[in-house]
Image: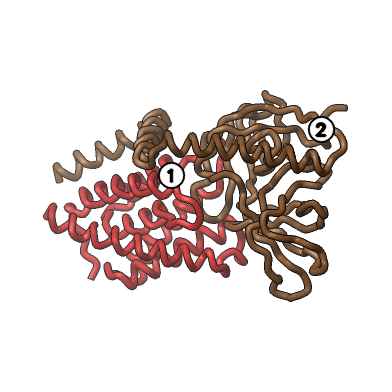
Amino acid sequence: MRRLIVALIIVCGVAALVAYGEVGQRLGFVMRDLTRLASLSALVDENTALKKENATLRAQLVAGAQTQSEQRIALTAAKVFSLYPFNIKSTLYITAGAAQNVEIGDGVLFSPRVFMGKVVRVSRTTSEVITVFDPSFSLPVRVGAEEVDGLLEGGLSPRVTLIDKNKPVKTNDAVYTTHPSLAYGLLVGTVSLVHDDASGAFIEAEVAVPYVLADVRDVLVTPSPANAAF
Amino acid sequence: MLHFKLTSFPAALLLFLISVALWCFFWQLQGLKPNVLLVLVVVLAFFVPVPVIYALFLVLVVAWVRYSPFLEIEYGALALAGVVSFVIIRLIFFRRTVPVLLICILAGQTLFWITVLGVSAAASIPFVVEFLYNSAVGIALFSLGIWLEKKFS
Protein backbone atom coordinates (compact mmCIF):
# COMPACT_ATOMS: atom_id res chain seq x y z
CA MET A 1 0.00 0.00 0.00
CA ARG A 2 2.86 2.33 0.89
CA ARG A 3 4.46 1.63 -2.48
CA LEU A 4 1.22 2.48 -4.23
CA ILE A 5 0.89 5.78 -2.38
CA VAL A 6 4.48 6.76 -3.17
CA ALA A 7 3.98 5.87 -6.83
CA LEU A 8 0.72 7.84 -6.89
CA ILE A 9 2.47 10.91 -5.51
CA ILE A 10 5.22 10.57 -8.14
CA VAL A 11 2.68 10.31 -10.97
CA CYS A 12 0.72 13.31 -9.67
CA GLY A 13 3.90 15.37 -9.49
CA VAL A 14 5.05 14.40 -12.97
CA ALA A 15 1.53 14.98 -14.36
CA ALA A 16 1.43 18.47 -12.88
CA LEU A 17 4.87 19.34 -14.23
CA VAL A 18 4.24 17.96 -17.68
CA ALA A 19 0.84 19.61 -17.86
CA TYR A 20 2.50 22.86 -16.89
CA GLY A 21 4.42 22.51 -20.11
CA GLU A 22 7.98 23.46 -19.30
CA VAL A 23 9.28 20.03 -18.36
CA GLY A 24 7.51 18.28 -21.21
CA GLN A 25 8.84 20.81 -23.67
CA ARG A 26 12.40 20.61 -22.35
CA LEU A 27 12.41 16.81 -22.22
CA GLY A 28 11.01 16.84 -25.74
CA PHE A 29 13.89 19.04 -26.87
CA VAL A 30 16.40 16.76 -25.13
CA MET A 31 14.92 13.67 -26.78
CA ARG A 32 14.83 15.42 -30.14
CA ASP A 33 18.44 16.49 -29.75
CA LEU A 34 19.49 12.96 -28.79
CA THR A 35 17.68 11.56 -31.81
CA ARG A 36 19.27 14.14 -34.06
CA LEU A 37 22.70 13.36 -32.63
CA ALA A 38 22.13 9.70 -33.33
CA SER A 39 21.26 10.46 -36.94
CA LEU A 40 24.29 12.67 -37.55
CA SER A 41 22.30 15.87 -37.45
CA ALA A 42 25.05 18.03 -38.88
CA LEU A 43 25.08 16.02 -42.07
CA VAL A 44 21.30 16.07 -42.24
CA ASP A 45 21.22 19.85 -41.82
CA GLU A 46 23.90 20.31 -44.43
CA ASN A 47 22.04 18.03 -46.78
CA THR A 48 18.82 19.97 -46.23
CA ALA A 49 20.58 23.26 -46.90
CA LEU A 50 22.05 21.91 -50.13
CA LYS A 51 18.67 20.57 -51.20
CA LYS A 52 17.17 23.97 -50.49
CA GLU A 53 19.78 25.73 -52.60
CA ASN A 54 19.45 23.23 -55.40
CA ALA A 55 15.66 23.41 -55.35
CA THR A 56 15.75 27.20 -55.40
CA LEU A 57 18.02 27.23 -58.44
CA ARG A 58 15.85 24.67 -60.19
CA ALA A 59 12.72 26.64 -59.34
CA GLN A 60 14.30 29.81 -60.71
CA LEU A 61 14.92 27.99 -63.98
CA VAL A 62 11.28 26.87 -64.04
CA ALA A 63 10.04 30.35 -63.24
CA GLY A 64 12.30 31.82 -65.88
CA ALA A 65 10.97 29.43 -68.46
CA GLN A 66 7.32 29.86 -67.53
CA THR A 67 6.99 33.57 -66.85
CA GLN A 68 8.12 36.53 -68.83
CA SER A 69 8.94 38.73 -65.89
CA GLU A 70 10.46 37.92 -62.51
CA GLN A 71 7.75 37.84 -59.88
CA ARG A 72 8.49 39.59 -56.64
CA ILE A 73 7.28 37.52 -53.70
CA ALA A 74 7.04 39.02 -50.21
CA LEU A 75 8.31 36.46 -47.73
CA THR A 76 8.07 36.05 -43.97
CA ALA A 77 10.58 33.70 -42.34
CA ALA A 78 9.31 31.26 -39.70
CA LYS A 79 10.58 28.28 -37.73
CA VAL A 80 8.88 24.90 -37.74
CA PHE A 81 8.23 23.93 -34.14
CA SER A 82 6.16 20.80 -34.56
CA LEU A 83 4.92 18.21 -37.02
CA TYR A 84 1.57 16.45 -36.79
CA PRO A 85 2.58 13.25 -35.03
CA PHE A 86 -0.01 10.76 -36.32
CA ASN A 87 -0.62 9.13 -39.70
CA ILE A 88 -3.99 10.67 -40.36
CA LYS A 89 -2.88 14.09 -41.56
CA SER A 90 0.31 15.84 -42.62
CA THR A 91 0.46 19.28 -41.10
CA LEU A 92 3.14 21.33 -39.43
CA TYR A 93 3.09 24.23 -37.03
CA ILE A 94 5.15 27.36 -37.56
CA THR A 95 6.16 30.36 -35.48
CA ALA A 96 4.37 33.01 -37.49
CA GLY A 97 0.77 34.05 -37.07
CA ALA A 98 -1.61 36.95 -37.31
CA ALA A 99 0.94 39.19 -35.59
CA GLN A 100 3.24 38.62 -38.59
CA ASN A 101 0.35 39.23 -41.03
CA VAL A 102 -0.02 35.54 -41.84
CA GLU A 103 -3.50 34.67 -43.07
CA ILE A 104 -5.39 31.52 -44.00
CA GLY A 105 -4.57 30.56 -47.58
CA ASP A 106 -1.03 31.96 -47.55
CA GLY A 107 1.56 29.76 -49.22
CA VAL A 108 4.39 28.16 -47.24
CA LEU A 109 7.69 27.66 -49.01
CA PHE A 110 10.73 25.46 -48.37
CA SER A 111 12.92 28.01 -50.15
CA PRO A 112 12.03 31.23 -51.99
CA ARG A 113 10.44 29.41 -54.94
CA VAL A 114 9.75 25.90 -53.65
CA PHE A 115 6.20 25.27 -52.47
CA MET A 116 5.48 23.12 -49.38
CA GLY A 117 1.92 23.81 -48.30
CA LYS A 118 -0.75 26.31 -47.31
CA VAL A 119 -1.76 27.97 -44.06
CA VAL A 120 -5.06 26.53 -42.82
CA ARG A 121 -5.29 27.92 -39.28
CA VAL A 122 -3.84 31.01 -37.69
CA SER A 123 -3.45 32.18 -34.11
CA ARG A 124 -1.70 35.32 -32.94
CA THR A 125 1.85 33.99 -33.16
CA THR A 126 1.52 30.52 -34.71
CA SER A 127 -0.06 28.88 -37.73
CA GLU A 128 -0.98 25.42 -38.92
CA VAL A 129 0.18 24.46 -42.39
CA ILE A 130 -1.28 21.66 -44.50
CA THR A 131 1.50 20.09 -46.58
CA VAL A 132 1.49 18.34 -49.94
CA PHE A 133 1.73 15.05 -48.01
CA ASP A 134 -1.74 15.46 -46.52
CA PRO A 135 -4.36 13.14 -48.10
CA SER A 136 -6.87 16.00 -48.33
CA PHE A 137 -4.48 18.36 -50.12
CA SER A 138 -5.14 19.18 -53.77
CA LEU A 139 -3.94 21.91 -56.09
CA PRO A 140 -4.02 22.62 -59.85
CA VAL A 141 -0.49 22.34 -61.26
CA ARG A 142 1.34 22.21 -64.56
CA VAL A 143 4.02 19.75 -65.55
CA GLY A 144 7.14 20.21 -67.65
CA ALA A 145 8.14 22.59 -70.42
CA GLU A 146 4.94 21.74 -72.32
CA GLU A 147 2.89 23.13 -69.42
CA VAL A 148 0.63 20.11 -69.18
CA ASP A 149 -2.29 20.62 -66.80
CA GLY A 150 -2.93 18.26 -63.92
CA LEU A 151 -4.23 18.07 -60.38
CA LEU A 152 -1.78 17.59 -57.53
CA GLU A 153 -3.22 15.22 -54.94
CA GLY A 154 -1.55 14.97 -51.57
CA GLY A 155 -0.67 11.80 -49.71
CA LEU A 156 2.33 9.85 -48.49
CA SER A 157 3.43 9.94 -52.14
CA PRO A 158 2.03 13.11 -53.73
CA ARG A 159 0.97 12.63 -57.34
CA VAL A 160 -0.37 14.60 -60.27
CA THR A 161 -3.58 13.12 -61.61
CA LEU A 162 -5.95 13.77 -64.52
CA ILE A 163 -3.13 14.28 -67.03
CA ASP A 164 -4.17 13.94 -70.65
CA LYS A 165 -2.77 10.70 -72.07
CA ASN A 166 -1.72 12.45 -75.26
CA LYS A 167 0.42 15.05 -73.49
CA PRO A 168 4.16 14.54 -73.12
CA VAL A 169 5.03 14.04 -69.45
CA LYS A 170 8.28 12.37 -68.52
CA THR A 171 10.51 11.68 -65.54
CA ASN A 172 12.32 14.71 -64.07
CA ASP A 173 9.79 17.18 -65.47
CA ALA A 174 9.16 20.03 -63.05
CA VAL A 175 5.77 20.27 -61.34
CA TYR A 176 4.75 23.82 -60.47
CA THR A 177 1.80 25.72 -59.10
CA THR A 178 -0.77 27.50 -61.25
CA HIS A 179 -3.55 28.22 -58.79
CA PRO A 180 -4.46 31.94 -58.56
CA SER A 181 -4.29 31.79 -54.77
CA LEU A 182 -0.52 31.32 -55.05
CA ALA A 183 2.30 32.97 -56.95
CA TYR A 184 2.61 31.42 -60.41
CA GLY A 185 5.33 28.88 -61.06
CA LEU A 186 6.34 27.81 -57.55
CA LEU A 187 8.14 24.48 -57.80
CA VAL A 188 6.37 21.57 -56.08
CA GLY A 189 8.78 18.84 -57.12
CA THR A 190 9.78 16.72 -60.07
CA VAL A 191 8.12 13.77 -61.74
CA SER A 192 9.62 10.51 -60.50
CA LEU A 193 7.31 8.02 -62.21
CA VAL A 194 4.60 8.15 -64.89
CA HIS A 195 1.87 5.53 -65.26
CA ASP A 196 -1.79 5.07 -66.27
CA ASP A 197 -4.38 5.79 -63.62
CA ALA A 198 -6.89 3.17 -62.42
CA SER A 199 -9.48 4.08 -65.04
CA GLY A 200 -6.98 4.02 -67.90
CA ALA A 201 -8.39 7.31 -69.22
CA PHE A 202 -5.63 9.54 -67.82
CA ILE A 203 -2.05 9.24 -66.72
CA GLU A 204 -0.66 9.91 -63.27
CA ALA A 205 2.76 11.20 -62.29
CA GLU A 206 4.36 10.49 -58.93
CA VAL A 207 6.06 13.60 -57.54
CA ALA A 208 9.40 13.66 -55.71
CA VAL A 209 9.82 16.73 -53.52
CA PRO A 210 13.25 18.30 -52.94
CA TYR A 211 13.18 18.06 -49.11
CA VAL A 212 12.52 15.66 -46.25
CA LEU A 213 9.60 17.04 -44.26
CA ALA A 214 10.91 15.83 -40.89
CA ASP A 215 14.21 17.67 -41.46
CA VAL A 216 12.72 21.04 -42.36
CA ARG A 217 13.36 23.60 -39.61
CA ASP A 218 12.82 26.91 -41.43
CA VAL A 219 10.11 27.94 -43.87
CA LEU A 220 8.97 31.07 -45.66
CA VAL A 221 5.40 32.32 -45.75
CA THR A 222 4.22 34.14 -48.84
CA PRO A 223 0.91 36.01 -48.84
CA SER A 224 -1.77 34.64 -51.10
CA PRO A 225 -2.57 37.13 -53.88
CA ALA A 226 -6.15 36.90 -52.63
CA ASN A 227 -5.00 38.07 -49.18
CA ALA A 228 -2.42 40.60 -50.29
CA ALA A 229 -3.36 44.26 -50.14
CA PHE A 230 -3.02 45.89 -53.54
CA MET B 1 -9.14 -14.33 -15.38
CA LEU B 2 -8.43 -10.66 -14.88
CA HIS B 3 -6.21 -10.25 -11.90
CA PHE B 4 -4.59 -6.94 -11.12
CA LYS B 5 -1.88 -6.59 -8.54
CA LEU B 6 -0.41 -3.53 -6.93
CA THR B 7 2.88 -4.54 -8.56
CA SER B 8 1.20 -3.75 -11.88
CA PHE B 9 1.65 -0.10 -11.13
CA PRO B 10 5.48 0.16 -11.35
CA ALA B 11 5.27 -1.93 -14.52
CA ALA B 12 2.78 0.58 -15.94
CA LEU B 13 5.02 3.48 -14.98
CA LEU B 14 8.01 1.89 -16.72
CA LEU B 15 5.87 1.09 -19.76
CA PHE B 16 4.93 4.75 -19.91
CA LEU B 17 8.56 5.89 -19.87
CA ILE B 18 9.63 3.32 -22.48
CA SER B 19 6.72 4.25 -24.74
CA VAL B 20 7.52 7.95 -24.50
CA ALA B 21 11.09 7.22 -25.60
CA LEU B 22 9.75 5.10 -28.48
CA TRP B 23 7.33 7.87 -29.37
CA CYS B 24 10.12 10.43 -29.61
CA PHE B 25 11.98 8.08 -31.93
CA PHE B 26 9.03 7.30 -34.22
CA TRP B 27 8.02 10.95 -34.38
CA GLN B 28 11.10 11.67 -36.46
CA LEU B 29 10.29 9.03 -39.07
CA GLN B 30 8.75 9.61 -42.47
CA GLY B 31 5.67 7.88 -43.80
CA LEU B 32 3.41 5.52 -41.92
CA LYS B 33 4.47 4.80 -38.37
CA PRO B 34 2.87 3.13 -35.35
CA ASN B 35 0.72 5.27 -33.11
CA VAL B 36 2.76 4.45 -30.01
CA LEU B 37 0.78 6.63 -27.61
CA LEU B 38 -2.52 5.09 -28.70
CA VAL B 39 -1.02 1.65 -28.12
CA LEU B 40 0.30 2.86 -24.77
CA VAL B 41 -3.11 3.96 -23.47
CA VAL B 42 -4.54 0.60 -24.53
CA VAL B 43 -1.74 -1.43 -22.93
CA LEU B 44 -1.87 0.65 -19.75
CA ALA B 45 -5.53 -0.30 -19.39
CA PHE B 46 -4.27 -3.86 -18.89
CA PHE B 47 -1.90 -2.94 -16.09
CA VAL B 48 -3.35 -0.05 -14.12
CA PRO B 49 -5.84 -1.41 -11.59
CA VAL B 50 -7.48 1.80 -10.35
CA PRO B 51 -9.59 4.04 -12.63
CA VAL B 52 -8.35 7.23 -10.98
CA ILE B 53 -4.71 6.31 -11.56
CA TYR B 54 -5.52 5.30 -15.13
CA ALA B 55 -7.14 8.71 -15.61
CA LEU B 56 -3.93 10.30 -14.33
CA PHE B 57 -1.95 8.30 -16.88
CA LEU B 58 -4.32 9.51 -19.60
CA VAL B 59 -3.69 13.10 -18.51
CA LEU B 60 0.06 12.41 -18.70
CA VAL B 61 -0.21 10.95 -22.20
CA VAL B 62 -2.37 13.79 -23.48
CA ALA B 63 0.00 16.33 -21.91
CA TRP B 64 2.92 14.60 -23.59
CA VAL B 65 1.34 14.40 -27.03
CA ARG B 66 0.63 18.14 -27.10
CA TYR B 67 2.06 19.10 -30.48
CA SER B 68 0.03 22.13 -31.46
CA PRO B 69 -0.88 25.50 -29.97
CA PHE B 70 -4.53 24.80 -30.77
CA LEU B 71 -7.02 22.62 -28.91
CA GLU B 72 -7.09 19.48 -31.06
CA ILE B 73 -9.71 16.77 -31.27
CA GLU B 74 -6.88 14.20 -31.26
CA TYR B 75 -6.29 14.76 -27.54
CA GLY B 76 -9.89 13.81 -26.75
CA ALA B 77 -9.82 10.90 -29.21
CA LEU B 78 -6.72 9.49 -27.54
CA ALA B 79 -8.28 9.70 -24.08
CA LEU B 80 -11.54 8.23 -25.40
CA ALA B 81 -9.67 5.28 -26.92
CA GLY B 82 -8.10 4.64 -23.52
CA VAL B 83 -11.42 4.81 -21.70
CA VAL B 84 -13.01 2.41 -24.19
CA SER B 85 -10.14 -0.07 -23.75
CA PHE B 86 -10.42 0.20 -19.97
CA VAL B 87 -14.14 -0.56 -20.18
CA ILE B 88 -13.77 -3.38 -22.75
CA ILE B 89 -11.25 -5.21 -20.58
CA ARG B 90 -13.25 -4.89 -17.38
CA LEU B 91 -16.82 -5.24 -18.58
CA ILE B 92 -16.62 -7.57 -21.59
CA PHE B 93 -13.60 -9.85 -21.67
CA PHE B 94 -12.34 -9.98 -18.07
CA ARG B 95 -8.95 -11.33 -19.14
CA ARG B 96 -5.50 -10.23 -20.18
CA THR B 97 -4.61 -12.03 -23.38
CA VAL B 98 -3.08 -11.04 -26.71
CA PRO B 99 -6.37 -11.46 -28.66
CA VAL B 100 -8.11 -9.13 -26.20
CA LEU B 101 -5.21 -6.69 -26.60
CA LEU B 102 -5.58 -6.77 -30.39
CA ILE B 103 -9.33 -6.21 -30.13
CA CYS B 104 -8.73 -3.24 -27.86
CA ILE B 105 -6.09 -1.79 -30.21
CA LEU B 106 -8.45 -2.20 -33.16
CA ALA B 107 -11.31 -0.57 -31.24
CA GLY B 108 -9.08 2.28 -30.03
CA GLN B 109 -7.56 2.91 -33.45
CA THR B 110 -10.95 2.81 -35.18
CA LEU B 111 -12.36 5.25 -32.67
CA PHE B 112 -9.35 7.53 -33.09
CA TRP B 113 -9.52 7.60 -36.90
CA ILE B 114 -13.30 7.98 -37.01
CA THR B 115 -13.25 10.76 -34.44
CA VAL B 116 -10.60 12.72 -36.32
CA LEU B 117 -11.39 12.01 -39.99
CA GLY B 118 -14.82 10.40 -40.20
CA VAL B 119 -16.13 6.91 -40.91
CA SER B 120 -14.64 6.54 -44.40
CA ALA B 121 -11.10 6.96 -43.08
CA ALA B 122 -11.21 3.63 -41.28
CA ALA B 123 -11.61 1.79 -44.59
CA SER B 124 -8.23 2.63 -46.07
CA ILE B 125 -4.89 0.94 -46.63
CA PRO B 126 -3.01 3.30 -44.25
CA PHE B 127 -5.47 2.28 -41.51
CA VAL B 128 -4.68 -1.41 -42.03
CA VAL B 129 -0.92 -0.82 -42.18
CA GLU B 130 -1.03 1.27 -39.03
CA PHE B 131 -3.03 -1.45 -37.29
CA LEU B 132 -0.34 -4.00 -38.16
CA TYR B 133 2.36 -1.67 -36.78
CA ASN B 134 0.28 -0.91 -33.70
CA SER B 135 -0.32 -4.60 -33.09
CA ALA B 136 3.40 -5.36 -33.23
CA VAL B 137 4.23 -2.52 -30.84
CA GLY B 138 1.28 -3.46 -28.62
CA ILE B 139 2.33 -7.10 -28.30
CA ALA B 140 5.90 -6.01 -27.51
CA LEU B 141 4.76 -3.55 -24.82
CA PHE B 142 2.24 -6.02 -23.41
CA SER B 143 4.89 -8.77 -23.13
CA LEU B 144 7.27 -6.28 -21.55
CA GLY B 145 4.58 -5.25 -19.08
CA ILE B 146 3.90 -8.85 -18.06
CA TRP B 147 7.63 -9.43 -17.60
CA LEU B 148 8.04 -6.24 -15.57
CA GLU B 149 5.06 -7.16 -13.45
CA LYS B 150 6.66 -10.49 -12.59
CA LYS B 151 9.94 -8.72 -11.84
CA PHE B 152 8.26 -6.42 -9.34
CA SER B 153 6.16 -9.12 -7.66
Q: CA distance from mark 2 to mark 1?
A: 45 Å
Q: Which residue is mark 1?
A: B62
- Relative to A53, residue B150 above or below: below
Q: In the rendered image of this protein, which colour is used for chain B?
A: red
How crowded pointer 2 is (Cα within 10 Å; few <14, some 14-19, many 20+) is rated as few
Label 2 marks a residue whose chain is A
Taking B84 as reference, is B43 left or right? left
Tell which of A34 and A207 is nearer to you. A207
- Relative to A8, residue B19 above or below: below
Q: Which residue is mark 2?
A: A71
Q: Residue at x 35, y 64 (%)?
A: B136
* Residue A113 image-quadrant placement: top right
Q: Residue at x 44, y 47 (%)?
A: B27
**Which amino acid, mark 2?**
Gln
Mark number for residue A18?
Answer: none
Tell which of B126 and A177 is nearer to you. A177
Q: Which chain is brown?
A: A
**Quadrant location of the C terminus of chain A in the rendered image:** top right
Q: Residue furthest top?
A: A99
Q: Nearer the viewer, mark 2 or mark 1?
A: 2
